[in-house]
Image (cartoon, helix red, strand yellow):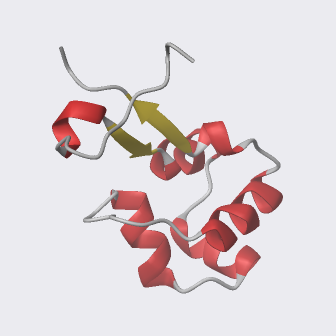
Amino acid sequence: MADIKSIVHYQTAEYGGIKVKLAQALDSRGITRNHLRKLTGLKYDVITRYYRADHIEMIDLDFFAKVCFVLNCEISELLEYQPPEQ
């Protein structure tokens, strides 16, 4: 229990964040955003927002489940926790 921390009074910079790595996953497989759209049925603008990691405050688990299924990958290929900079 010593490793458990309360973040009630912390700011984002103090507890880190989640990095979206969709661009790296697609680029390494040679898959375009348009091709992912065709494979998943997801909207292109939603894919682009995650691809660019633009202003993402909340993630859609259904989106990532579909992408993991299509790419046959683990969620860790698409999302990564980044601890706060010390």
Rendered position, 53 above or below 14 = below
* Depth check, front residue: 17 or 24: 17
Q: Is residue 68 left or right of residue 34?
A: right
Picture residue at 73% right of the left edge, 63% below the top? 65
* Depth check, front residue: 31 or 3: 3
Picture residue at 43% right of the left edge, 63% below the top? 50
Rendered position, 44 above or below 72 = below
Rendered position, 46 above or below 36 = below
The image position of residue 38, as x and y in percent, is 69, 80
Picture residue at 56% right of the left edge, 71% below the top? 60
The image position of residue 35, as x and y in percent, is 64, 71
Picture residue at 62% right of the left edge, 56% below the top? 31
Q: Is residue 29 left or right of residue 33?
A: right
* Depth check, front residue: 49 or 82: 82
Quarter location, residue 75: top right
The image position of residue 3, as x and y in percent, is 49, 16
Task: In the displayed orientation, state which residue is furthest to the front.
Answer: 1
Quarter location, residue 82: top left
Quarter location, residue 86: top left
